[in-house]
């Protein structure tokens, strides 16, 4: 059975079915396809730098191993935070009643980055919440699609298209001041546009 | 990452070279096994191009002979390479028969929302519209924050930062204008279309994703914050 987002605002419970907003299903897609001299599509493979192994898709296994080359099953993994503490696994919030907070200002949403977006189908909605959402107010709650170590924020809002849930993570910036030293280049920081690929769908 | 330099104009059409930077990544987790020994993710070789189904079928002739060979031995396991770390590697394109392609032709294939192919043509590079050679103009089209968050999912963002005292003043003034108006401004690039300059979505590198950009400004007594919010997804219901 599909699980729902169940929220409690001031003691009143509402629940929503959810389906992911997929860019391809919304806009279609433009992709680059590499073909050979006969026009047949080709696939990307990995060639080891020493030239001894050509690895087509499906030829590589991802494993977790300790320094002695012993494999650790995924189910036996423990997450350890930067301060050395073992992190607790967080249960999925789907089907679980979670507290709804708000209304929150739009700037609160802008302090986050969306990871996924769901269209919500109200199965049972409290009249007060519905009225607030229809008035343009935004609410937030915690969200975890499946059991894991990360917990995200879900922003609940409504526009003329319907009810939406934006799953997001906090990505705030600090203010800049005149005498602040220029930012140092960070080798560990990935270029945010490195993985960009052609896709003009929305335009 | 090297910070990128871009050119941006204010509402008085003055432009300046400034830098953009992404948010700091959240500190991730390290992983241990149940004995609290650190473990790392590794990529190991399972097989090579000689152990694919197509290669084995070619080697043994038909499915029955291949099945017998699999029962009698382990032709699907390359004992000299299986279990080895992949290590440094390059990406190559291979044909259906597994041979490496030395000269590739790239096509652009467009599919509609139902997944049906509607266009196929030779791929043409799409140039970046944001960078240190093209000025991002001031569009003057402003929106409330509420309008933006109700219409778009913001999937990326960069902070605009000054490179010297002059550009501090320049960016502070932009942030102050937006802060006082309590608005965000639409940012568009300029693209060369058939020899004419046209407004275009923000593209940060050749063949990169296009984004709608919205610049938000906040100021306090001595500092400013200018964030360019980027979206390539509208809050719309998928039509089934």
Image (tube, rainbow, N blue to C red):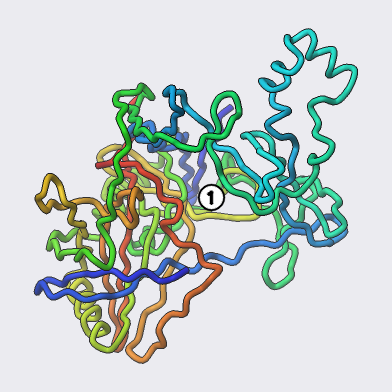
In-front residue for pair A8/A171: A171
Residue B9 percent coordinates (x, y) = 17, 70
Residue A94 in sight from this viewpoint: yes
Quick one: quadrant of the N terminus of chain A?
Answer: top right
Kind of element beneath mark 1: strand
Q: Which residue is painted at 34% across and 48% down in the image?
A: B207
Apparent side of residue A96 relative to residue B62 in the rendered image (left or right)? left
Apparent side of residue A90 relative to residue A67 in the rendered image (left or right)? left
Q: Which residue is mark 1?
A: A143
Q: Which residue is painted at 21% across and 76% down in the image?
A: B16
Apparent side of residue B109 relative to residue B82 in the rendered image (left or right)? left
**B115 shown above or below B218:** above
**B237 shown above or below B210:** above
In-front residue for pair A190/B169: A190
In-front residue for pair B24/A128: B24
Q: Which residue is painted at 16% across and 51% down in the image?
A: B192
Apparent side of residue A33 relative to residue B194 in the rendered image (left or right)? right
Rendered image quadrant of residue B105: top left
């Amino acid at each position: 059975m599909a699980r729902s987002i169940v929220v409690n605002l001031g003691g009143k419970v509402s629940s929503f079915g959810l389906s992911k907003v997929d860019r391809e299903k919304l806009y279609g897609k433009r992709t680059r396809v590499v073909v050979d001299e006969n026009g047949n599509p080709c696939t990307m493979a990995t060639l080891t730098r020493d030239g001894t192994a050509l690895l087509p898709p499906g030829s590589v296994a991802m494993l977790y191993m300790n320094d002695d080359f012993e494999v650790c099953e995924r189910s036996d993994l423990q997450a350890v935070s930067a301060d050395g503490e073992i992190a607790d696994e967080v249960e999925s919030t789907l089907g679980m009643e979670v507290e709804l907070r708000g209304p929150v200002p739009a700037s609160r949403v802008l302090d986050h980055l969306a990871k996924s977006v769901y269209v919500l189908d109200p199965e049972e909605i409290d009249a007060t919440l519905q009225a607030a959402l229809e008035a343009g107010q935004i609410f937030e709650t915690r969200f975890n699609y499946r059991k894991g170590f990360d917990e995200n924020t879900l922003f609940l809002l409504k526009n003329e298209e319907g009810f939406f849930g934006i799953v997001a993570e906090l990505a705030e910036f600090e203010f800049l001041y005149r005498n602040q030293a220029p930012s140092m280049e960070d080798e560990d920081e990935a270029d945010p546009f490195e993985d960009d690929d052609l896709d003009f769908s929305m335009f | 990452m090297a910070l990128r330099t871009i050119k941006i104009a204010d509402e008085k059409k003055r432009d300046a070279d400034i830098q953009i930077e992404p948010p700091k990544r959240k500190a991730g987790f390290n992983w241990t096994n149940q004995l609290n020994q650190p473990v790392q993710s590794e990529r190991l070789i399972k097989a090579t191009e000689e152990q694919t189904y197509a290669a084995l079928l070619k080697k043994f002739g038909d499915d029955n002979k291949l099945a017998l060979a699999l029962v009698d031995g382990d032709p699907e396991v390359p004992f000299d390479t299986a279990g080895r770390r992949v290590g440094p590697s390059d990406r190559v394109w291979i044909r259906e028969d597994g041979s490496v392609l030395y000269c590739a032709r790239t096509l652009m294939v467009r599919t509609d929302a139902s997944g049906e192919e509607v266009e196929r043509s030779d791929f043409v590079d799409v140039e970046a519209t944001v960078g240190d050679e093209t000025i991002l103009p001031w569009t003057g089209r402003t929106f409330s924050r509420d309008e933006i968050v109700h219409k778009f999912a913001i999937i990326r963002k960069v902070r605009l930062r000054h490179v010297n005292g002059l550009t501090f003043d320049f960016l502070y003034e932009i942030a102050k204008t937006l802060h006082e108006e309590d608005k965000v401004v639409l940012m568009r690039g300029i693209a060369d279309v058939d020899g004419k300059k046209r407004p275009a979505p923000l593209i940060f590198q050749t063949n990169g994703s296009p984004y709608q950009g919205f610049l938000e400004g906040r100021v306090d007594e001595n500092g400013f914050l200018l964030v360019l919010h980027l979206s390539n997804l509208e809050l719309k219901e998928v039509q089934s």
